[in-house]
Image: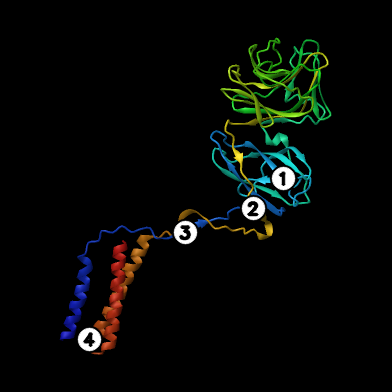
Amino acid sequence: MNRKGLLLIAFLLGLYLVPTNLSYNHVAPSIGIESQFILSLDGNSWLEGWDYRRQIPLTGSAGAGTNYQIILTLSYNAKMQTDFDDIRVTAYDGNTSLDYWFESKVDSGYVICWVEVTDNLDNNQVIYLYYGNDAVSTTSNITETFLFADDFNDGTIDGEKWFRPAFCAGSAEETGGALVLTGAVADWETRGGKVQYGDDYAFRMKIKTSAESNYWHAGFDERSLDGSDDGNIDAARVTFSTTKYYGTYNGTEETSARTTLYTSYQTMEIRRNATHLKYYELANEVASFSTHLPQDDCGLWFGAYGSGHTTSVDWSLVRKFVDVEPSAGSLEDEELYSEWSPIEWQEVGEAILIFSVPFDYWALNMILIFGGLILMLVSVCIIAVKVRDRTITNDSGVLLLFLFCVGWGLFIGGTIIG
């Protein structure tokens, strides 16, 4: 055998011995595609059908929580309907409508609007005021906005909300959009609310009394929630006379001076928590009681005292409150729908996607090993025949050696994967 043949045999023997003497410690990884990207979202959307909006920043307060009612005073804008019927309020996403109620308004002037904010007002929040839609009517709704409310507009006292204790005389009726209570001789005429509340609530009402009334009352009251009280005054409420406010609990009174008797409707509010009972006329605190407080959950209470004396209630409601209340800041600049950019890219998160592609490693191993062996065997056989017949050339030899190396590579790959 000539020198070329010996070199070829030595080369082939070396290739054979290399893989048989290697030790592989390899764990095949999952085969997959990993993609990392930054997720971006629209800043917010727009309430369909409205031309204008303004953002309202809200300053939160510890303890306010979710579904807190805040008050807004909104001035008329010429782009609004003159009666404010197109006013809508949404959450920060710009599209989720929030319940609201107009406490009072002057057409083309201003509106006092309560909004129930669904987001947690323990922290600062943002809401949107929308206007500029001539085709809609108001959706102002007192009962949807508050924990409890009655505007006395259906002409019949709602037995699901109110009851009259058995010991009371006089009369009570809904008339002219108001609850009218008329007292009897030396007795209270009262209506008790069937819903009870603990601490941290405010009772708001629009109320007046007749000129002849010396006493009338409203507030949170512990007595007669089931209508069976014996008439003793064991209430925690504010009682009004021409000279004093009385905070009463278990027949003992705490007083504060009073100078005015309201014979026209006045908005008043009684705020209660575990340490005090405070009375407000509009936004002004006029009386505070700290020693005669409700000991248990209380219902609502109205009354008039004395024959022919009346108390009239235009509406009443119960809302959440904390001593330091959340507040609304100044309205931001007006946004016009046609100028609004729906996409405000902002980095809000990061995600990794793994697309796993399962493989049968045993089958792949066998394909590579046997494919490599076949390719090596064929190339070796052809080389051997050409060497024997002395027909091998440099070009054919290089090609056959290349094919052999490819087969050897497939064989090694199959061994590693396996």
Q: In which quarter of the image is residue 418?
A: bottom left
Q: Is residue 258 above or below residue 33?
A: above
Which residue is tagged 3? 37
Residue at the spot x=68%, y=36% of the render?
Answer: 145
Circles 4 and 3, Cβ within 8 Å, touching? The answer is no
Which residue is tagged 4? 388
Image x and y of residue 104, in percent: 75, 37
SS at mark 3 in the image: strand
From the viewer's perspective, is the residue at label 1 or at label 3 nearer? 1
Circles 4 and 1, Cβ within 8 Å, touching? The answer is no
Task: Answer few, some or many: residues within 10 Å of disc 1's Cα (few below 14, many 20 plus, some between 14 and 19).
Answer: some
Q: What residue type is labelled 1?
A: Ser
**Quadrant containing the N terminus in the rendered view:** bottom left
Spatial distance from mark 4 to mark 3, Cα to Cα?
62 Å
Spatial distance from mark 1 to mark 3, Cα to Cα?
46 Å
Image x and y of residue 134, in percent: 78, 51
Which residue is tagged 2? 333
Say left or right for 324 vs 260: left
Q: Earlier in the sequence, mark 1 or mark 3?
A: 3
Q: What residue type is labelled 4?
A: Arg
Q: What residue type is labelled 2?
A: Asp
Image x and y of residue 157, in percent: 78, 25
332 and 231: which is toward the camera = 332
SS at mark 4 in the image: helix
Spatial distance from mark 3 to mark 2, Cα to Cα?
34 Å
Q: Which of marks 4 and 2 is nearer the N terminus?
A: 2
Q: Earlier in the sequence, mark 4 or mark 3?
A: 3
From the viewer's perspective, is the residue at label 4 or at label 2 nearer? 2
Q: Residue 75 carries which label?
A: 1
Circles 4 and 2, Cβ within 8 Å, touching? The answer is no
From the viewer's perspective, is the residue at label 4 or at label 3 nearer? 3
Task: Answer few, some or many: residues within 10 Å of disc 4's Cα (few below 14, many 20 plus, some between 14 and 19).
Answer: few
